[in-house]
Image (cartoon, rainbow, N blue to C red):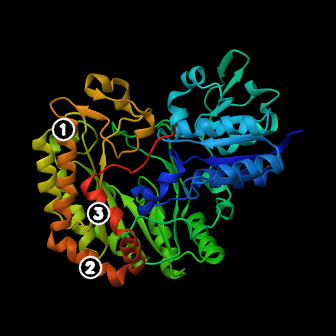
């Protein structure tokens, strides 16, 4: 007899567990699955028992999944999947069905929200898919979905040979009405999770999400889960969230995993006012757009504990940038980056290589632009056209695209724009990274991390061999399932 008041939520790894120790992305950053933790808290609040197995933090989790399924016999297993982890999610769903016959599988995440019904044809292990936000939909699905799935808005369901989509929910959730994520259900939290190396001053630390969606419409961004909506927590809720993390888990630094932290200036002013007047002894990072910062706000944010800001540069070729995002003004962006640095904040640039229309000349312009700026750190991703992004719709017209979902992790050049080759892109990618680390100012910045972020240096030295290998072969060291 299955327990229809219990569900196991799983965050798949996406590749073989024995390769996890060599995976440079895990070595550099393990982020908690905040979406699943939020769903778990929401379900628990409504009398539904929810447990989480995060295979990314604990790669060898098949036994933990089996043990829970056999002991608790939950009626549902939920799997939150990116594109690269979707096939692993299917494998776990098949494992669950073999372990507990009759269990219902529920898939969520950006990949299924983007591709919807077409996945059900090729993957019979899928019983349901949650399209969009998961909290309210999952609660309704567990309560009545087995008997009447058509009554639950926001799902795709399989009934015999038919597949049906019940349509989008009428409106998004009020974020301030949600309970704080169930961090306590993440095994080993917070020590089993790590922010990006050299991106924090102290430990323990973690990530936090204070908004959903984005008001902009860049060509490369997946919009499938939140679509065109943009909502955010109030300043008061956000302050209480941080206070909870500090008092319950001893967290001393937060990375806000929001696309646009400073979009609503009044919210930021209220939040920073709370942090200044009632200090929590915490610091934080955030991502911003150049349009939504100014000197007065930056000084205020630093006083409130802001330690680092990240900005999406994407490319240093203004003509190419204008093809893919709004407000492509590189002079304005450079001015704001210098403004951040002048305010005493660490700066991080977010870039990608291989956009449609990229040329060797545009990559050279990007190098020249980035190296002219006071950027302390940067992240260079390999452009990947994800389902759900506007550019995915006609990507095959723009170049050669090897749509291998398991490799769609921004660390492989699966798309090669016209006029370029994969080998040349790889060579230029390595050159970009090496030249960044050769710059004296950058090297000195990393040296100062000895006293500004000593834990980062310990992690770096402990994994020195892996980082050196990455500079020579900038792909993930992982193997697929046989």
Q: Residues within 10 Å of mark 2 (few under 14, many from 20)?
A: few
The answer to whether any part of residue 108 appears in the image is: no
Going 15% across and 40% down the picture, which residue do you hit? Answer: 319
Q: CA distance from mark 2 to mark 3?
A: 17 Å
- Quadrant into which the N terminus falls: top right
- Residue 92 point in image, percent of width and height: 64, 40
SS at mark 1 in the image: loop
SS at mark 2 in the image: helix
Going 40% across and 59% down the picture, which residue do you hit? Answer: 262
Q: CA distance from mark 3 to mark 1?
A: 27 Å
Q: Nearer the viewer, mark 3 or mark 1?
A: 3
User: Residue under circle 3?
Assistant: 468
Q: Furthest residue to the right?
A: 1
Q: Is residue 168 above or below residue 5?
A: above
Give 230 or 50, whichever is nearer the viewer.
50
Answer with left or right where residue 301 lies relative to residue 67.
Answer: left
Q: CA distance from mark 2 to mark 1?
A: 34 Å
Q: Earlier in the sequence, mark 2 or mark 3?
A: 2
User: Residue under circle 1?
Assistant: 358
Q: Is residue 404 above or below residue 335?
A: above
The reply to whether discs 3 and 1 touch (Cβ–Cβ < 8 Å) is no
Q: Residues within 10 Å of mark 3 (few under 14, many from 20)?
A: few
Q: Residues within 10 Å of mark 1 (few under 14, many from 20)?
A: many
The answer to whether any part of residue 170 appears in the image is: yes
User: Residue under circle 2?
Assistant: 447
- Residue 148 point in image, percent of width and height: 80, 26
Q: Earlier in the sequence, mark 2 or mark 1?
A: 1
Q: Is residue 273 above or below residue 330?
A: below
Q: Nearer the viewer, mark 2 or mark 1?
A: 2
The reply to whether discs 2 and 3 touch (Cβ–Cβ < 8 Å) is no
Image quarter for residue 406? Answer: top left
């Amino acid at each position: 007899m299955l327990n229809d008041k219990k569900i196991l939520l799983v965050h798949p790894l996406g590749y073989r567990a024995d390769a996890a120790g060599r995976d440079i992305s895990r070595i550099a950053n393990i982020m908690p699955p905040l979406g699943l933790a939020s769903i778990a808290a929401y379900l628990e609040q409504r009398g539904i028992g929810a447990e989480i197995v995060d295979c990314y933090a604990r790669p060898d989790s098949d036994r933990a999944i089996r043990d829970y399924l056999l002991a608790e016999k939950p009626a549902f297993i939920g799997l939150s999947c990116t594109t690269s982890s979707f096939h692993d999610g299917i494998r776990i769903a098949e494992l669950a069905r073999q372990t507990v016959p009759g269990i219902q599988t529920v898939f969520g995440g950006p990949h299924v929200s983007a591709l919807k019904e077409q996945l059900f044809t090729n993957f019979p292990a899928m019983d349901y898919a949650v399209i969009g936000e998961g909290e309210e939909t999952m609660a309704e699905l567990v309560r009545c979905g087995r008997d009447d799935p058509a009554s639950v808005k926001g799902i795709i369901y399989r009934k015999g040979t038919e597949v049906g989509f019940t349509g989008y929910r009428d409106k998004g959730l009020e974020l301030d009405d949600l309970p704080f994520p169930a961090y306590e259900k993440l095994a080993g939290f917070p020590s089993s999770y790590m922010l990006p190396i050299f991106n924090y001053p102290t430990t323990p630390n973690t990530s936090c999400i204070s908004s959903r969606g984005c008001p902009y419409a860049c060509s490369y961004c997946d919009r499938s889960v939140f679509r065109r909506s943009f909502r955010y927590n109030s300043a008061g809720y956000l302050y209480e969230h941080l206070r909870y993390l500090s008092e319950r888990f001893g967290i001393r630094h937060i990375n806000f995993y929001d696309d646009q932290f400073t979009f609503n200036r009044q919210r930021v002013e209220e939040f920073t006012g709370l942090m200044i007047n009632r200090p929590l002894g915490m610091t934080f990072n955030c991502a911003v757009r150049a349009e939504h910062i100014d000197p007065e706000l930056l000084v205020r944010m630093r006083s409130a504990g802001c330690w680092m800001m990240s900005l999406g540069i994407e490319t240093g070729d203004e003509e190419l940038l204008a093809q893919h995002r709004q407000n492509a003004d590189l002079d304005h962006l450079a001015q704001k980056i210098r403004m951040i640095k002048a305010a005493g904040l660490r700066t991080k640039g977010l870039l990608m290589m291989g956009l449609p229309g990229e040329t060797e000349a545009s990559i050279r312009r990007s190098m020249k632009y980035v190296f002219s700026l006071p950027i302390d750190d940067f992240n260079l991703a390999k452009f990947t056209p994800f389902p759900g992004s506007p550019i995915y719709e006609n990507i095959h017209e723009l170049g050669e695209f090897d749509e291998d979902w398991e490799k769609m992790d921004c660390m492989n050049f699966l798309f090669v724009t016209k006029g370029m080759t994969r080998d040349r892109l790889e060579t230029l990618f390595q050159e970009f990274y090496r030249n960044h680390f050769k710059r004296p100012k950058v090297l000195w910045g990393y040296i100062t991390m000895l006293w500004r972020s000593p834990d980062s240096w310990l992690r770096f030295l402990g994994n020195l061999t892996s980082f050196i290998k990455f500079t020579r072969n900038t792909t993930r060291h992982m193997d697929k399932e046989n």
